Amino acid sequence: MGTRAIIEIYDEHGVLLLIIYSQYDGHLSSLGKDLADFLRSGVLTRGIGAGEARTQFNGAEDVATRCVCYLKRNTGAAGSPAYEHAAGGVYIMGKREGQSTEELAAESFAEYMYTVTFKNDTIMLRAAAPFCKIDDTSKREWVPVYSGPVSGYDGTKAEEAQEALDESREEETVALKAANESGGEDSPPPGLSP
């Protein structure tokens, strides 16, 4: 079993270009960091310019294509060298008509969801972790633990934000359990929402 993740990539107009499913190492400080490092390694261009020393991403479509290539080349078992012809690990996915990416992520048991967008020629990254409501753990809400320019992404800080989110949920669960055990109502104490 791995730590599954979904990566969705949109173009400059908000049109979904691609959904990538990653079977392994989807953590914020693993896949999240690798994705951010890859996206930071290049410069977003409109056309290919001569003399540019950095990798050039010729628009959103090129970013999407290169992400797949990069992730496929860098897929392998933990501790093994990356190999170019790795079977599995990273897949392109589609959605059923009317299905949201969040529903797809839940059905594929994804533990993280990354969204790549573009704003004013800047590559943006949103990293989200699932948060279950206390009263209905079957429904997951994807809560951003980072959202901003890819240049500012820090996997460690994103994990700290996720830990804080997890702690707040644990506190809410304990308070709700205590209220229920004391014969209180089925709702949490004031200030805590289900």
Image: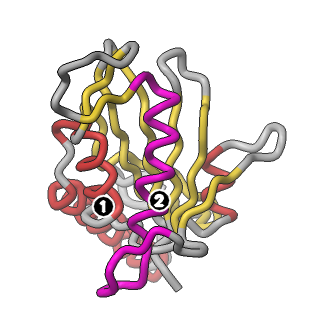
Which of the two residues, 111 or 62, is positioned nearer the viewer here? 62
149 in the magenta segment:
no
Name the amino acid type tagged 1: Leu
Is residue 186 among what the camera can see? no
Near mark 1 (Cα within 10 A), the count class, few <14, some 14-19 or many ≥20, is: many
Decide if residue 68 is on the left or right side of residue 171.
right
Which of the two residues, 186 or 117, is positioned nearer the viewer here? 117
Mark 2, mark 1: which one is toward the viewer?
Answer: 1
| Placement of 158 over or under 180, stated as above or below | above
Q: Residue 109 appears at what percent x and percent y? A: 60, 69
Determine which of the numbered discs, if any, sits on residue 130 in the image. 2
Which of the two residues, 130 or 91, is positioned nearer the viewer here? 91
Q: Residue furthest front?
A: 50
Quarter of the image where one finds residue 42: top left
| Placement of 12 over or under 71, stated as above or below | above
Decide if residue 66 is on the left or right side of residue 170.
right
Quarter of the image where one finds residue 155: bottom left
Q: Earlier in the sequence, mark 2 or mark 1?
A: 1
Determine which of the numbered discs, if any, sits on residue 97 in the image. none
Query: Magenta part of the protein: which range?
Result: 58-84
Decide if residue 152 is on the left or right side of residue 120.
left
The answer to whether mark 2 and mark 1 are in CB contact below 8 A is: no
Disc 2 secondary structure class: strand
Which of the two residues, 99 or 8, is positioned nearer the viewer here? 8
Residue holding disc 1: 28
